[in-house]
Amino acid sequence: MDPVEEKRVVEEILQNRRLPYSIELLDIEGEKYTVRNNFGSTVIYYKKDDNYYLETELD
């Protein structure tokens, strides 16, 4: 993924989830986005209906 597209995705997630910290996009598999936050934790978001959800929110 090119850097411009990666930045757009990161900004979408930050805005949609209203995250007060920075994230780094690690991997994209279809609608599954793996990110690392500035605390070192890895989090997976799923894009559904133009929103980003944690796996537990979709169950």
Image (cartoon, rainbow, N blue to C red):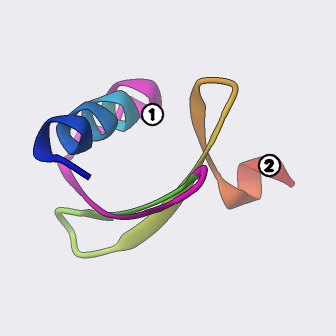
- Residue 40 magenta: no
Total marks placed: 2
Q: Disc 1 designates what residue?
A: 17
Dot placed on the residue nearer the N-terminal end, 2 or 1:
1
Q: Position of residue 18 (x, y in %)?
A: 37, 29
Q: Farthest right residue?
A: 59
The magenta-colored residue range is 15-31
Tag 1, which secondary structure? helix
- 33, above or below 13, in the image: below
Q: Which residue is mark 2?
A: 58
- Label 2 residue SS: helix
Residue at 59% x, 24% y is 50
Q: x%, y% of residue 57?
A: 74, 48
Q: Mark 1: give few (<14), some (14-19) or many (20+) Cα within 10 Å.
A: some
Q: Amino acid at mark 1?
A: Arg
**Residue that appears at 25% across and 31% down:** 8
Report the side of 4 relative to 47 (left or right): left
Name the quadrant containing residue 19.
top left
Query: Horizontal placement of 36 versus 42: left or right?
Result: left
Query: Residue flagged by tag 2: what amino acid is it?
Result: Leu
Relative vertical location of residue 12 with respect to residue 57 in this rendering, above or below: above
Q: Nearer the viewer, residue 37 or 49?
A: 49
Residue 56: % across, % down: 74, 58
